[in-house]
């Protein structure tokens, strides 16, 4: 895609929320590489930003022209819609011109409760006033080595209720590159991108690719949803998290989003990173050493 519109004011800092996490850290690096000043948004930032403490928001937004909006702990949690509506209203009042929001892929119909919350959170961004771009991302590759699945994978058994459902996992670096483009170039306002990798994989196939790259035995164990929920509860996860993760994994099991898109290529002009390359590089870095 050719970008011909005038870039936004890149002299003012871009507030990157979730800047110490999987996506935000890569967005901050991608912007830095473009020479764009970044304000790191997070509870340990200077100034700090806390979704749960609105008194921290004005200082974090002061002088900012663009925001990478990542909701933590998850866009599908109950407070996300009200928090994002209030935040984007304040962002608009503070002079923010552009918001790029990280969201997740959503089916058009038959949405789960979690997907309904995500859709409402997107709607709050669309109506806030600043230019918006929504990035609906598939499951991140990095869930397997940096995120909540990593401990199970490292231990050698990933037990999930996804059966033979396929997910088009996507690289966090590709998401971040798309975010950096949407934050700094023209032509992306009012767009909703669906960011996927090029290949759909079952969790069993993903674990097999990781095992092969790591050169060790790893197993995928199919569970019933109730068994999985009981296991998470026994590990001490709160009921809201159990319901949220159950919803997300049910979507994969039941299909509905088991197709890829060209949006990474459309924005970046190249193919998305392949899962096998991710597995090889993460293995070489020792991510899954037992
Ligand atoms: N995982 C997936 O496959 C997937 C797919 C699509 C969309 N998503 C969405 O991606 C988002 C998570 O992104 P991620 O995986 O990159 O995050 P992450 O690695 O889990 O990191 C969370 C980030 O949020 C910050 N944070 C946590 N609590 C906060 C609070 N109360 N106020 C302000 N910042 C807070 C953390 O920094 P501090 O602790 O320093 O504050 C950290 O930088 C969620 O909105 C989720 O819905 C995830």
Image (cartoon, rainbow, N blue to C red):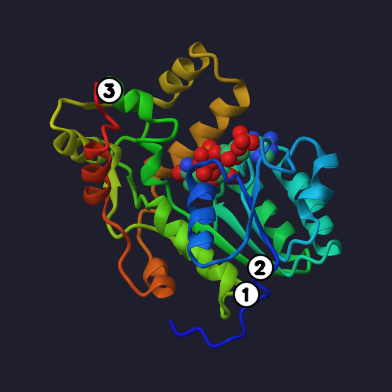
Tag 1 and tag 3, C-beta contact below 8 Å: no
Badge 2: how crowded within 10 Å, few (<14), some, or many (20+)? many
User: Which one is nearer the viewer's eye here, 73 or 179?
Assistant: 179
Mark seen at residue 197: none
Q: Earlier in the sequence, mark 1 or mark 3?
A: 3
State the residue position of label 2. Answer: 132
Is residue 75 toward the left or the right of residue 209 in the image? right
- What residue lies at 57% left-to-right and 53% top-to-bottom? 103
Badge 1: how crowded within 10 Å, few (<14), some, or many (20+)? some
Tag 2 and tag 1, C-beta contact below 8 Å: yes
Q: What's the distance in space between the residues labelled 3 and 2, CA to CA?
A: 40 Å
The x and y percentages for residue 95 are 81, 66
State the residue position of label 1. Answer: 189
Q: What's the distance in space between the residues labelled 2 and 1, CA to CA?
A: 5 Å
Q: Is 47 located above or below residue 266 in the figure?
A: above
Q: Quadrant of residue 274?
A: bottom left
The x and y percentages for residue 56 are 81, 41
State the residue position of label 3. Answer: 157
Q: Is 185 located above or below residue 57 in the figure?
A: below
Is residue 63 toward the left or the right of residue 213 in the image? right
Q: Quadrant of residue 161?
A: top left
Q: Quadrant of residue 71?
A: top right
């Amino acid at each position: 895609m050719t970008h011909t519109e005038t870039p936004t004011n890149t002299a003012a800092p871009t507030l990157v929320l979730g800047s110490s996490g999987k996506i935000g850290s890569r967005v901050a690096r991608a912007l830095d590489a473009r020479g764009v000043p970044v304000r790191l948004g997070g509870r340990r930032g200077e100034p700090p930003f806390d979704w749960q403490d609105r008194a921290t928001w004005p200082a974090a937004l002061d002088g900012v022209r663009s925001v990478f909006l990542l909701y933590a702990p998850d866009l599908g949690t109950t407070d996300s819609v009200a928090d994002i509506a209030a935040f984007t209203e304040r962002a608009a009042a503070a002079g923010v011109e552009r918001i790029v929001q990280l969201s997740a892929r959503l089916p058009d119909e038959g949405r789960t409760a979690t997907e309904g919350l995500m859709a409402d959170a997107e709607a709050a961004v669309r109506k806030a006033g600043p230019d918006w771009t929504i990035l609906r991302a598939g499951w991140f590759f990095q869930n397997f080595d940096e995120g909540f699945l990593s401990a199970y994978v490292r231990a050698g058994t990933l037990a999930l209720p996804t059966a033979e459902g396929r997910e088009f996992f996507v690289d966090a670096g590709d998401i971040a590159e798309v975010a950096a483009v949407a934050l700094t170039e023209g032509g992306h306002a009012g767009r909703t991108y669906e960011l996927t990798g090029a290949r759909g994989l079952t969790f069993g196939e993903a674990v097999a690719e990781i095992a092969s790259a790591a050169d060790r035995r790893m197993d995928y164990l199919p569970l019933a949803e109730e068994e999985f929920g009981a296991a998470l509860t026994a590990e001490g996860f709160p009921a809201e998290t159990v319901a949220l993760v159950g919803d997300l994994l049910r979507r994969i099991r039941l299909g509905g989003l088991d197709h890829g898109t060209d949006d990474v290529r459309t924005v970046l002009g190249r193919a998305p990173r392949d899962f096998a390359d991710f597995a090889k590089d993460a293995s070489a870095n020792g991510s899954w050493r037992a």
